[in-house]
Amino acid sequence: MNKTAIVTGASNGIGRAIAKAFAAAYYNVVLADIDQENGLELQDQLLEQGYTAEFIQCDVSEPDSINSLIAESVKTYGGIDILINNAGISEFISPDEMDVETWDKIINTNLRPAFLLTRSAAASMKKRGGGSVVNIASTRAQMSEKNFEAYAASKGGLLALTHAMALSYSEHNINVNCISPGWIHTGDYEKLRDIDHQQHPSNRVGKPEDVARACLFLTDGENDFINGENLVIDGGMTRKMIYEH
Ligand code: NAP
């Protein structure tokens, strides 16, 4: 029996690459996103390639939408084995101009769903004898540019949520890990400049597939000794000491 993986934010960018990677590894993949057009297009593409995938429209900032996503996934595939909490939004806003609604929107899209989705998916994983969750955070959880308070706080919250939930669900063999990507280019890679690549110790900007491969690795049952961890995938940028000359 094939395992089932839910990927949020699967219609575009990093989530799209993660969903493709799980499909190619013969998981049943639930493509969860608010973007129906690109989600259905990906679903059709994967089905044409002989893989198993279903797009389910979901707004992760709405708890009812999360409940429907989990219920429909269980109904279609019989249970859930893997959850990738990837959907996220970001905005540069000065702290002096940040209103409460925008703050709540960012936190309720980036952080709260990882808690609610993990808890709901865990109910199914427990019945299957275990499972694996990956939260997609950001290197901005641990370093900053100006005017990124809400996003940084949401991603820092994901790091903490990861080890807390890893402990709470350990008795059910559910691993919870986190990935902190750096600059992952989701647009036209050819348009990047030399300086974009060269500033990275790895001499290139990241690609969505860099994160997708790590998701497969962290959710592979053979790697279950990695738990509650945060894997930084940033080409070495946060290890680079920067002094201004
Ligand atoms: P992206 O290209 O904007 O894709 C995000 C996807 O999530 C989009 O399909 C978006 O739909 C969807 N989405 C937004 N709000 C949603 C909601 N409430 N419910 C369900 N789906 C929703 O972003 P990305 O660059 O791939 O980033 C993916 C994740 O990686 C995010 O959590 C981000 O913070 C993190 N990350 C990215 C980078 C990077 O350099 N790209 C670096 C560090 C961390 P719409 O397009 O319709 O809004």
Image: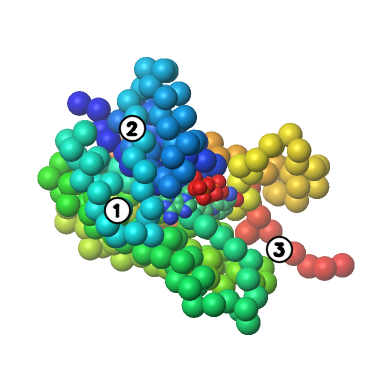
Placement of 189 over or under 120, stated as above or below: above
For numbered disc 3, what is the local secondary structure? loop
Residue toward you, 100 or 233: 100
Residue toward you, 191 or 34: 34
If the image is split into quadrants, where does the N terminus sit? top left
* Residue 181 visible, this orientation: no
Distance between the alpha carbons at the discs numbered 2 and 1: 16 Å
Please give the name of the residue rendered at 26% of the width and 33% of the height, measured from the top-left corner: 3
Q: Describe residue 41's horizontal placement relative to residue 23 as left or right.
A: right
Q: Residue 171: horizontal and vertical position, in percent? A: 16, 56
Q: Residues within 10 Å of mark 2 (few under 14, many from 20)?
A: many
Would you name the residue on which mark 3 appears?
241
Q: Are marks 2 and 1 in contact (CB under 8 Å)?
A: no
Q: Describe residue 114's horizontal placement relative to residue 73 as left or right.
A: right
**Farthest left residue?**
127
First in sequence: mark 1 vs mark 3: 1
Distance between the alpha carbons at the discs numbered 3 and 2: 44 Å
The image quarter in which residue 117 lies = bottom left
Q: Nearer the viewer, mark 1 or mark 3?
A: 1
Q: Are marks 1 and 3 in contact (CB under 8 Å)?
A: no
First in sequence: mark 2 vs mark 1: 2
Would you name the residue on which mark 2 appears?
54
**Farthest right residue?**
245
For numbered disc 2, what is the local secondary structure? strand
Placement of 182 over or under 206, stated as above or below: below
Q: Would you say the beta carbon of the disc 1 residue lies within 8 angstroms of ligand 1?
A: no
**Kind of residue at disc 3:** Met
Q: Describe residue 155's horizontal placement relative to residue 4 as left or right.
A: right
